[in-house]
Each structure stands twice: as C-alpha cells, then as structure tokens.
Amino acid sequence: MPGEIRNPILPGFYPDPSICRVGDDFYMVTSSFSYFPGVPVFHSRDLQNWEQLGHVLERPEQAPLDSRYISGGIYAPTIRYHDGLFYMITTNVSGVGDFVCTAERPEGPWSDIHVIHGAPGIDPSLFWDEDGTCYMCGTGDWKDGYPHIWGAVLDTDTWTLGEKRELWRGALHDCWAPEAPHIYRKDGRYYLLIAEGGTEHYHAVTIARSDSPLGKYRGYEGNPILTHRHLGWDYPICNTGHADLAQLQDGSWYMVLLASRIYGGYHKNLGRETFLVPVDWRGEWPVVNPGKGCVEFTCPAPALPLHPFEARDDNDLRSPVWNTLGTPTNRPVRIEGNELYLRCVAPTFIPQPGEPEDWKRQAIGFYGRRQQHMCFAASAWATLPEAEGVSCGMAVVQNGYAALRVELTRDQSGVTARALKSWQAPGGTRCEALLGEAAVGETVRLEIRAEGQCYTLLADDRPLGSADGGFLGSESAGGFVGAYVGMFASGNGTDSPAEARFTRFRYQGC
C-alpha cells in the first residue's frame, strides 16, 4: 500500500544489520559468517528500495574463512561515516579477531584489514564524539561470571585502544548475552543500545544512558524497548533484536534490526533477516513502533521521495548475491560467460567438524545464493565430468550437517541422479538418507522446489524425492545462518582437477 514499507526489507539470511546516513543516502551492512565475499553493502535513499553495491571483504587476504564451520567467520559488522571516510568494523571469530576496513566510497575499494589488538569479544562498534574523539565498544569476555559491554578510546592512526572500561551489563539482572552495542549522542547525553537474551526466541533490544561516552550507563526503567518473546511461539515474526538507529533529515528516527519469519511450525529456514520499524524519540527515551510496540510485516514509510533502483538479474552468476563457502583457494570456482565451472575439490559435500586439518586449506566447490522465499523453484543444467568418483549437483544447505541435495554420480552403467537428505542425529553423528534415484544422461536439468516446508528434488522434471524441510531451520540445526541454494561439485575425498559445468541457473520466488 502507498505509504508503507514491506518487511523484511532484506529477506533471507541478512542478520545483524548496521546502518548509517550520509546526506540523503543510507548505507547498511550485515553479517556474512563463512560465506565469501563477506559483509554485503547496501544503499538506499528511501529506506524501502535497497541495492547491493558489493561487499567490503572481496579479497582473500581480507577474510581468511574456514568452510567447515559455516557459523564461524564474520560476525556483526558496524558501518559508520566520519570526516570523508567510511568505516566498517567487525570480528572474524575464525582467528583474526576485531578489525576495521575503510573506504572513500561505500562500493569500495575497501582497505586491507586493520586489526585491533587487545579487543575482547565480538560485535564491535565505533562512535565519534563532537570533539573528534573515536570510541570503540564491544561485547566483553565474561567478568565475575557475567558478560558485559566495554568501551575505550580508539586511535584511528595507530589502531590502538586506550584503557577499556565496563559500560553496562544489560537491563535484566544476570542477563544472557548482552551484545551488539551502539553509542549515540542526543541532547547532550550518550545512549547505549544493545541486544540481550540471546539471538533466538528471547532476543530483545535494551537501552541505557550516561553523561559521558565511557561513563557508567544507567538502564531505562522501561526496558526492553523491543522484544517478541512475550508474544508466544506462534507469532509469525520472532527473535527480534540486534538493532541500529538512523536519524533522518527531518529529525525522525528509524531502527533496523534482525528478526525471523517462522513457517510450517516453529522453523526459520530463511535465517535472521533485516526488518525496519519507526522510532519516536521526541522524549528522553526512544519508543519503537509507537502504538504497536512490535515488528510487523508492514512499516510506515518515511516522508522521503521514492528512489527505486533498476532491476538486476540475480540469476546472472556475477551478481553480488552469489557466494562461495569459505575463502576460495586453488580456483574451485570459474565463470565463463554465464557458465559456471566448479572443480571437484577434496572434501565431501559438506565437511564435518573434526575432519583432517589439511582440508582446511580448501574451500569446497559450492556456489550459492540465499533462500529468500518460503516457496521457490531453483534449477540449473548440470554436466558431470568424465572422472572417477566425483559428483555434482544442486543443494539447499543450512550448515555442515543439514542439507538436501540432488546430485549426479557415475558408475560403469552410466550416470545416476540421486536425491539425498543429510542431518545431524543426537550425539553429533551425521546421517544421510537416499530419497530416490534414476538413470539420466550426461547433461541433466536439476531442480529444487519448495512449497512451504515441502522440498522436492527433481532431475529432468522427474521428482526423485521429497522431504519436510523443517530440519533446515537454525532452531533445529543450530548455528546462526540461513539456508543457501546453489550448485556444488565434490571429489568425495579425492582432489580431482575435473570440473562440473552448470548453465542456465534460475531462482524464482513465489
């Protein structure tokens, strides 16, 4: 409807949003975990039409990522603009820690990483005071048995921290996981916005205030200012939290935050998505979605001119929506025209935790994009290389255990298409079930269709098998990511130079 914005504004696995405004333009980044390139960057002029400009982390040396643990890697970035320069600060939990990249333009190129030594925890953020001093805050290590939010002055010439101080431990006594801190200055006071309660059902947004950036913060008596945990397990939008605020040109405020859409039961296959809500901050404390107090599927639009972007073909394999799993090494992915070639690299389809250390040097041959719809159809023509022991196909992937795939294999009798389901059993065992199979030719049209939680795997328009996809939600599979749909090739334990070829990929939501 006119005057309304449809939520989520970024559907699919786009969690931990951070936003900043520069003049008439808004820029936003989200977490990317172990997918490469990392930290997607978005642009809007009206808060409802968003265009992806690219990624901050586009070079392997910026983001060493391990493909084995998909929920590792890049956590919770913050984007800020100061004195002609964009800053993105985040954490690579796979070994680098907190670091900053800078750029003169949000589309890049972004600098090499500047590691912030001595910064504990995750979810770092930056704030510049009116005198030009830069402050960094983050989620601290456990202290006296409880986690906390810390802050310190950051020297942006040497990227060194001053003395760290505890700022706040959250609104709820002994609260779980106080994290995602952002500092704002308003009416001469400093406000600290955080998330607490964990990133699942009990997630919440809380706020505190101080007279100085590094002073002790006092929590708002009306906390939490946003949560859905009291709405029950059937409310269609859950785990609201991890928010950031932007003030518009007219002085009004909006909040971006993560939340998940449940469907087919309490399942969140699409992961944590980015939502938008208005904020009334005319008083001392912000009021989220006045009169409603919750996140809805529509949001009142701001008084801004509409700026829709030219439609982009995301089925183009060079679109920025595409990612590899882990930092690509040894050229596992090659694109010529609109043909995709995936090398049959050493690991099995999705490596398990605890597999041989030498497999860490390889990214598996996977090239995918986010599942963004509850109902969709994704297809591609696949050609299996003439090599022993290799496989290729299409898959919908949640993590290292939970996946559905339709794959091609070869034996003496020819090529077979198989539909398979893999999942994690109690105790950590990885299980796999054959849903169906059929003999096929050398080049096959593979397809995955989803109608709600019913996923069907097809080869040459022939259904091979179906499965309930509820196990693909993070509440069942664990981790922090959402489902990806894409193409893969595997040497099934051997490192083959053979390449699988894919053409005419199509993803269509319905």
Image (cartoon, rainbow, N blue to C red):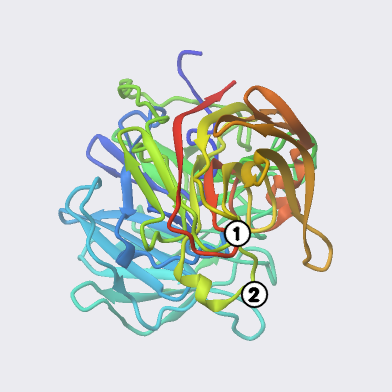
**Residue at 45%, 76% in the rendered image:** 95
Badge 2 amino acid: Gly
User: Which labelled disc corresponds to residue 381?
Assistant: none
Residue 361 location, quadrant: bottom left
The residue singled out by tag 1 in the image is 492
Q: Nearer the viewer, mark 1 or mark 2?
A: 1
The residue singled out by tag 2 in the image is 354
Badge 1 amino acid: Asn
| Residue found at the far right of this picture | 426
Dot 1: few (<14), some (14–19), or many (≥20) neighbours within 10 Å? Answer: some
The answer to whether residue 146 is above or below residue 191 is below
User: How many marks on residues?
Assistant: 2
Query: Residue 276's x, y, as percent?
Result: 50, 36
**Residue at 63%, 86% in the rendered image:** 144
Residue 341 location, quadrant: top left
498 or 99, which is in the foreground?
498
Q: Mark 2 and mark 1 in contact (Cβ < 8 Å)?
A: no
Residue 350 location, quadrant: bottom right
Callout 2 secondary element:
loop
Query: Residue 150's x, y, as percent?
Result: 47, 75
| Residue found at the far front of this picture | 412
Query: Residue 501's x, y, as percent?
Result: 45, 40
**Residue at 61%, 30% in the rendered image:** 447
